[in-house]
Image (cartoon, rainbow, N blue to C red):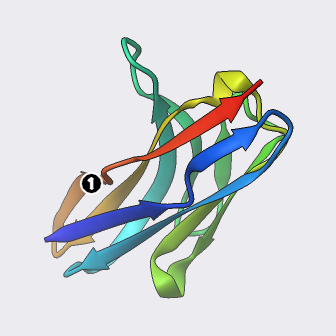
Amino acid sequence: QVQLVESGGGLVQAGGSLKLSCAASGSFSTINAMGWYRQTPGKQRELVARITSSGRTNYAGSVKGRVTISRDNAKNTIYLQMNSLKPEDTAGYYCNAQVVTGSLVGDYWGQGTQVTVSS
């Protein structure tokens, strides 16, 4: 069983910063790509940022230049540094990981952490 535990969400004023963390634990061989997604009520979950095991990254256009995703493979943890936050960044943020267990690749999600940006 694989668990993803997010932390670091909260309430921040517009223009402020937050850093989210997501740690993977459990029994697995390795983790391929990991990423952050966000979702607001009534809308589909959307990609914020993604990072491969080799460190290659991609970002949603709406956050590019304001957000940095990083990864510590030794700790099976990713981070999302968010700067210059805007009210439209308000959402539940979810961690995702593609986890390899033997010959199987599974897609796992965390429970989410709320980010609220006040104007």
Q: Is residue 90 above or below residue 26?
A: above
Amino acid under label 1?
Answer: Tyr
Say if residue 81 shows up in the picture: no
Residue 60 position (above or below residue 81): above
The residue tagged 1 is 108
> Which element is circle 1 on?
strand
Describe residue 77's horizontal placement relative to residue 26 as left or right: right
Q: Residue at x 38, y 69 (%)?
A: 31
Q: Position of residue 11 (x, y in %)?
A: 63, 43
Relative horizontal placement of residue 42, taking residue 2 as reference (left or right)? right
The answer to which image quadrant residue 62 occupies is top right
Identify which residue is drawn at 13% across, 71% down: 1
Could you tell me residue 59's position as x and y percent?
67, 39
Residue drawn at 50 percent across, 51 percent down = 35
Instruction: Residue at the far bottom: name it.
Output: 74
Quadrant, the C terminus: top right
In the picture, measured across the screen, residue 5 lies left or right of residue 20, that is left
Q: Position of residue 37 (x, y in %)?
A: 48, 39
In this view of the protein, which residue sits in the foreground, 104 or 65? 65
Q: Residue furthest top?
A: 42
| Above or below, comparing residue 13 to residue 102 in the picture | above
Between 100 and 43, which is closer to the camera in this rendering? 43
Residue 104 x %, y %:
16, 63
Q: How many marks?
A: 1
What's the residue at 61%, 63% (across, down)? 79
Q: Nearer the viewer, residue 54 or 15?
A: 15
